[in-house]
Amino acid sequence: MSPGVSLLGTTALLFDAPGATDLPTQQRIWSLAREAETWPEVREAVPGMNNMMLVFARAPRNLDALEIRLHEAWAAATPLPLGGRLIELPVVYGGEGGPHMADVTGHTGLGIDDLVALHTAPDYPVFALGSHPGYCYLGGMDPRIATPRRKIPVLSIPGGAVSIGGTQTGVSASAGPSGWNTIGSTAMCFFDPTQHPPALLRPGDTLRFRAERVVR
């Protein structure tokens, strides 16, 4: 399967990596972004989840040549481990802060204690930041707790909401709409514009959920 390349207007393009969404693929994305940022026509290379956005310093005159270079760079890219920090996140599962816990347990057939145990067991690598400031895309969730996104999105969930959407889990950095299933909450702040850097997490960090309390 070949990578996909598509234009984002006239100022950027999106590179979609083929294959599984896993840590080795994401590490190749990090490697490709580091390489692409050295190209003269590129202003910024932004790793996403299994993809990368290139923002042009100047629009390339020959897009075909750039696409060929991207394919060649991807073929040559090797996984780039990023040494990061381990952040432990205390979570209150269920209750008012986890309004969709019953939906997730109903879909998975698991009891709340088993679901919490499976959710807190892995160390989750931070693949990328995106969606909104401070939000991190995580890998490593146990497939036994995967739950489809909600058919009708919630208009607003608070910052610190811990949710499951499909095969992924994440933590909202600020209030906003969501189609994911919220199973808990944390008081940790993920984005503070007065700090440097303003985002708590960055690619290569690892997030560990810890059950501070389980509300039934």
Image (cartoon, grey):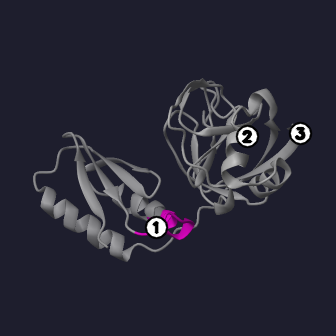
- The answer to whether the residue labelled 2 contacts the one labelled 1, judged by CB atoms less than 8 Å apart, is no
Identify the element where label 1 is drawn.
Answer: helix
Measured as percent of width and height from the top left, residue 87 is found at 75, 49
Camera-nearest residue between 21 and 99? 99
Residues drawn in magenta: 19-28
Mark with earlier residue (3, 1): 1
Q: Picture coordinates of residue 186 (x, y %)?
A: 76, 34
- Helix, strand or loop at mark 2: helix
For residue 74, side relative to residue 40 (left or right): right
- Residue 177 lies, with reference to residue 8, above or below; the image says above
Q: Is residue 142 visible?
A: no
On residue 69, which mark appears? Answer: none
Residue linked to disc 2: 102
- Left or right position of 40 against 176: left
Q: What secondary structure predominates along the stretch shown in magenta?
A: helix
Residue denoted by label 1? 28
**Spatial separation of the CA atoms under disc 2 and disc 1:** 37 Å
Q: Nearer the viewer, mark 2 or mark 1?
A: 2
Height in image: 190 above or below 138? Answer: above
- Say if residue 145 shows up in the picture: yes
State the residue in front, 62 or 40: 62
Quarter of the image that includes the C terminus? top right
Cα separation between marks 3 and 1: 37 Å
Extreme residue toward the right, this view: 213
Query: Does residue 26 show up magenta in the picture?
Result: yes
Residue type marked 3? Arg
Disc 3 + disc 1, Cβ < 8 Å = no
* Residue occupying image coordinates x 63% and y 24%: 194
Between disc 3 and disc 2, whose residue precedes?
2
Query: Which part of the image, by quadrant, shows the N terminus?
Result: bottom left
